Image (tube, rainbow, N blue to C red):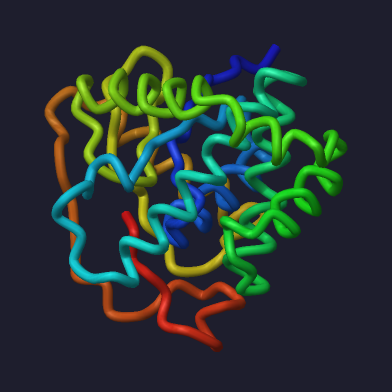
């Protein structure tokens, strides 16, 4: 029997890099023994009062709206439902360039995820959804997370990355996981980084300069 490795990926819907990492992990689930849970991270909270420019502020405010709707989805139908909603939001925002704080976009994403579109309105009318976003963010930040994507593999501490610039599928996704898993398991490994030389390969990159939210 194949041993299953539990992985939590902390995401903010505004970040195209986290989106691509989440798509990689969705592919890894098909070819390796892993089980992925989507968790939240609030880039608006990290950058509050120190945003680089108005474009970043707008992006993070819109994402905070979407995060609250994700909380409502999880409350209504569980973590898998929230993961489905994140997928639909990512396809809408990163691939089609639709705004994360549009009521129409949020309702359509909920419907596509098999959820009640009315959750978009009830989530924003309920202040506790924002409290839940901030609490989930606080817990992972106190463990050392500082951006997205952040992975938590089993009982290991949070790790930023990996950052990929395009969708990795099939066995190539599994092979990357094999190497990442080996690094995560090493208690002596902390950081490996090189400069990003290109933009994330998502649909909206061809229309607007993406906010590098992670």
Residue found at the far front of this picture: 125
Q: Is residue 36 visible?
A: no
Q: Residue at x 36, y 12 (%)?
A: 155
Q: Residue at x 34, y 71 (%)?
A: 55
Residue found at the far bottom of this picture: 206
Q: Residue at x 29, y 70 (%)?
A: 54
- Above or below residue 19? Residue 38 is above
Q: Nearer the viewer, residue 170 or 67?
A: 67
Q: Quadrant of the N terminus?
A: top right
Q: Quadrant of residue 68?
A: top right
Q: Nearer the viewer, residue 6 or 147?
A: 147
Q: Residue at x 23, y 42 (%)?
A: 46
Q: Quadrant of the C terminus?
A: bottom left
- Above or below residue 123? Residue 60 is below
Q: Is residue 51 left or right of residue 3?
A: left
Residue 187 x %, y %? 18, 23
Q: Quadrant of residue 121?
A: top right
- Above or below residue 172? Residue 66 is above
Question: How many numbered discs, if any?
Answer: 0
Residue 110 x %, y %? 78, 43
Residue 179 x %, y %? 39, 43
Q: Nearer the viewer, residue 143 or 161?
A: 143
């Amino acid at each position: 029997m194949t041993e299953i490795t539990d992985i939590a990926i902390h995401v903010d819907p505004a970040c195209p890099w986290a989106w691509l990492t989440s798509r990689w992990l969705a592919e890894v689930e098909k070819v390796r023994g892993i089980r992925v849970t989507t968790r939240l991270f609030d880039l608006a909270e990290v950058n509050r009062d120190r945003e680089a420019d108005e474009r970043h502020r707008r992006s993070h405010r819109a994402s905070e709206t979407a995060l609250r709707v994700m909380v409502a989805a999880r409350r209504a139908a569980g973590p898998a439902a929230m993961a489905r909603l994140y997928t639909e939001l990512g396809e809408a925002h990163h691939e089609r360039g639709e705004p994360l704080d549009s009521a129409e976009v949020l309702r359509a994403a909920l419907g596509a995820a098999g959820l009640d579109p009315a959750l978009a309105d009830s989530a924003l009318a309920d202040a506790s959804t924002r409290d839940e976003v901030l609490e989930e963010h606080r817990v992972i930040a106190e463990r050392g997370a500082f951006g997205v994507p952040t992975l938590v593999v089993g009982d290991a501490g949070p790790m930023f990355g990996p950052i990929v610039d395009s969708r990795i599928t099939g066995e190539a996704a599994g092979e990357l996981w094999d190497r990442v898993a080996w690094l995560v398991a090493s208690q002596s490994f902390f950081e490996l980084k090189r400069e990003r030389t290109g933009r994330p390969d998502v649909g909206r990159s061809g229309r607007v300069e993406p906010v590098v939210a992670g």
